[in-house]
Image (cartoon, grey):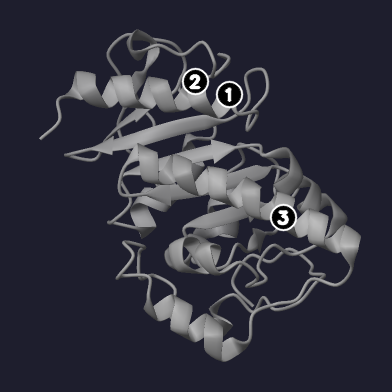
Amino acid sequence: MKTEIEFRRELAKASRMTYEKGFVAATDGNLSIRLPGDILLVTPSGTCKGDVTEEMIIKCDMEGNKIGPGGRVTTEILIHQEIYRQRSDVRAVVHAHPPIAIAFTIAGVSLAQCVIPEVVVTMGSIPTAEYFTPSRPEGQERIRELVKTHDAVMMDRHGSLTMGKDIWEAYRKLEKLEHAAHITYMARQMGNVRTLPADEVERLLNLRGFYGGPETEKDCNACGGCISEEKPVGASR
């Protein structure tokens, strides 16, 4: 079992990598790890994620009450709390602002299409939650149903949520999400984006457990997503 200081080091390193890869800018974004006993380690509010050290990591309870010294708990802790409440298997969450993926939501273009086999196997589809003012309580309602069955969710005009059994799984899903958005963007410049046939998507989803992916999304229709344009939704269509 890892110690708290080891978790702090991992969270600080993942925070710096998120910044260095350009998935956040300035003080944007936040990352968290759920410790045993439903205690959270979170990156500090108002701090560049590229500057975060293990000493700066904040500890809080599931209500967002700070435990011990440190900076301010992010007001977006509400989103992290909702994910942890809905998913007992999730031990880490990364909220980032990947530029290309966010641009898709602004353009009203869905990333819920099943296009790239590796993405389907590791994450399933990537739906978009309806717009809400960041840090407001209604955000919990907007993401609630989506995070139950998806490991990567876009928030309209705002950013991404990726989750995993540890901080590295959550971080790698962020990398894969933005990479998939980049590939899809380039494909759209060349012509129509060809989606995978429904029967192939079903086969890929059935491989998720074999390749170490979570088995939350079982149904090709779970995302409602083999479409090119969408209005963001508060639940899977």
Q: Looking at the picture, does residue 35 appear above or below residue 90? A: above
Residue in view at x 68 percent, y 23 percent: 25
Closer-to-camera residue (209/95): 209
Determine which of the numbered discs, if any, sits on residue 183 in the image: 3
> Residue beneath label 2, please?
16
230 to 140, vertically: above or below: below
Q: Which mark is residue 60?
A: none
Q: Is residue 163 left or right of residue 192?
A: left
Query: What's the CA distance linking mark 2 and mark 3?
Result: 25 Å
Residue 206 appears in the rendering? yes
Q: Are marks 2 and 3 in contact (CB under 8 Å)?
A: no
Measure how far apart labels 2 and 1 are at the Cα level: 5 Å
Residue at mark 1 = 19
Measured Cα–Cα span from mark 3 to mark 1: 21 Å
Horizontal and vertical percent position of residue 52? 46, 13
Q: 147 or 229, which lies in front?
A: 229
Specify whether 203 is left or right of 158: left
